[in-house]
Image: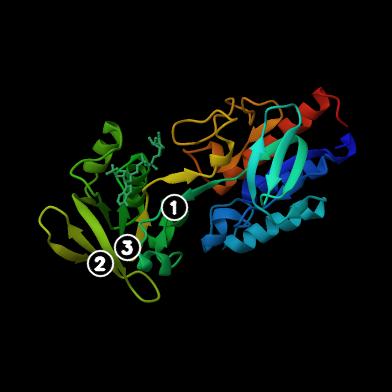
């Protein structure tokens, strides 16, 4: 492959991080090519109202916001292509990437913006009411349930943190925990247990989320006693963990035990020169559209500096 065919900047993934990387990389004349993955726009395309993204004072819809991001990336020349990257080889200075198992691409820099996927319980009612009272992000959607009763499933740090967040906004929070103990850190557990309007339902499983056009309740089974009861809630939050979409990089890129990419703190740099990680693929703590967009910008700036260092103009 002649050097003319080597892509200066290849972006994998099309959420807020990927599109922002596209905007910055295109404006810096890196002629970025982006592969969208199977869900162009990423996790925001499965949410409804977004009210916490700066610049949208009246709020916007997640899918529309991603269309805006896309249009802005395209305006400066980002070449956005539908396709799924399924294999990479980062062994040499030129990075190899395969799209849809057939097309082999070569790139000087790669920005990984593949995001993460929320884990779900797998109930049909959860799928049907997703975006209509069912959510995997309390920080994004909790506000819509101000003064109401809600439930949250999970017992890790995220669930504990989100339960206390919801408790400040909502009248009552049921926390549905499948075992007799929580996985969350002791400090987080204590916060939950000391919050008067959180009721922990121990040893409990959700059988069904109730409601037709929106959530009206949930049927909960106590796994110890077998007792089944309905709780009346209008919001149902699932906080049972996320899976970063990073499996194809694991032979090359340093990750933690859950698969989140380890970027050099304060940068988007990975252990491989010329490969940068941005957005939720490298962030298990904040996971917001605005933080993802911020790191997307960092990825493009880091790629630009790296290209200058190796003399690619
Ligand atoms: P975790 O994997 O730590 O916890 C997932 C929780 O969901 C567990 O309690 C698990 O139960 C429960 N769960 C899983 N599947 C089901 C199911 N089908 N039904 C009911 N419950 C289920 O995920 P988190 O998102 O909480 O945290 C991910 C990582 O991020 C952790 O390392 C955490 O410490 C970190 N984090 C740190 C924060 C901070 O420092 N401020 C904030 C948020 C996250 P069980 O325990 O029974 O397996």
Figure quarter occupied by ligand 1: top left
Which quadrant of the view contains residue 9?
top right
Camera-near label (1 vs 3) is 1
- Residue 99 location, x and y as percent? 69, 49
- Residue 247 location, x and y as percent? 53, 40
Of the two numbered discs 1 and 2 on the same chain, state the one appearing first in sequence. 1
Element carrying mark 2? loop
Q: Is residue 116 left or right of residue 96?
A: left
Give the alpha-carbon distance from disc 1 to disc 3, as whole Å: 17 Å
Residue at image position (47%, 53%) is 140
Q: Is residue 87 left or right of residue 126?
A: right
Q: Mark 3 near ligand 1 (CB under 8 Å)?
A: no
Nearer-the-camera pick, 218 or 249: 249
Give the alpha-carbon distance from disc 1 to disc 2, as whole Å: 20 Å
Local crowd size for mark 1, using a 10 Å CA cut-off: few (<14), some (14–19), many (≥20): some
Q: Which residue is mark 1?
A: 137
Is residue 185 visible to the viewer in this orientation of the structure? Answer: yes
Residue located farthest toward the left when viewing the structure as drawn: 225
- Residue 64 location, x and y as percent? 63, 63
Residue located farthest toward the bottom when viewing the structure as drawn: 212
Q: Are marks 2 and 3 in contact (CB under 8 Å)?
A: no
Of the two numbered discs 1 and 3 on the same chain, state the one appearing first in sequence. 1
Q: Which residue is mark 3?
A: 148
Position of the C terminus, as image quadrant, is top right
Q: Which residue is mark 2?
A: 232
Residue at image position (59%, 25%) is 264
Is residue 194 visible to the viewer in this orientation of the structure? Answer: no
27, above or below 128, in the image: above
Of the two numbered discs 2 and 3 on the same chain, state the one appearing first in sequence. 3
Residue located farthest toward the front when viewing the structure as drawn: 102
Element carrying mark 1? loop
Q: Mark 2 near ligand 1 (CB under 8 Å)?
A: no
């Amino acid at each position: 492959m002649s050097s003319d065919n080597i892509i200066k900047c290849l972006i994998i993934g099309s959420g807020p991080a990927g599109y922002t990387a596209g905007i910055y990389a295109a404006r810096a004349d890196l002629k970025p090519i982006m592969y969208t993955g199977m869900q162009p726009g990423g996790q925001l395309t499965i949410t409804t109202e977004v009210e916490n993204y700066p610049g949208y004072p009246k709020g916007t819809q997640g899918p529309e916001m991603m269309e805006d991001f896309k249009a802005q990336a395209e305006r400066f020349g980002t070449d956005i292509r539908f396709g799924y990257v399924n294999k990479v080889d980062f062994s040499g200075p030129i990075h190899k990437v395969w799209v849809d198992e057939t097309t082999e691409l070569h790139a000087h820099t790669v920005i990984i913006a593949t995001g993460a996927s929320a884990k779900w319980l797998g109930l049909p009612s959860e799928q049907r009411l997703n975006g209509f009272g069912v959510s995997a992000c309390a920080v994004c959607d909790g506000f819509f349930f101000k003064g109401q009763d809600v439930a949250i499933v999970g017992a890790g740090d995220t669930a504990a943190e989100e339960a206390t967040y919801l408790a400040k906004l909502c009248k009552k929070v049921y926390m549905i925990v499948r075992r007799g103990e929580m996985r969350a850190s002791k400090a987080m557990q204590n916060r939950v247990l000391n919050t008067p309007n959180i009721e922990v339902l121990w040893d409990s499983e959700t059988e069904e989320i109730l409601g037709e056009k929106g959530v009206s309740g949930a049927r909960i089974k106590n796994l110890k006693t077998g007792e089944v009861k309905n709780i009346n809630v209008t919001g149902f939050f699932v906080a049972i963990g996320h899976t970063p979409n990073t499996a194809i990089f694991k032979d090359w890129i340093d990750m933690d035990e859950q698969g989140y990419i380890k970027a050099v703190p304060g940068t988007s740099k990975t252990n491989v020169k010329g490969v940068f990680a941005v957005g939720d693929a490298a962030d298990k703590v904040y996971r917001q559209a605005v933080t993802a967009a911020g790191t997307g910008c960092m990825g493009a700036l880091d790629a630009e500096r790296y290209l200058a260092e190796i003399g690619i103009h």
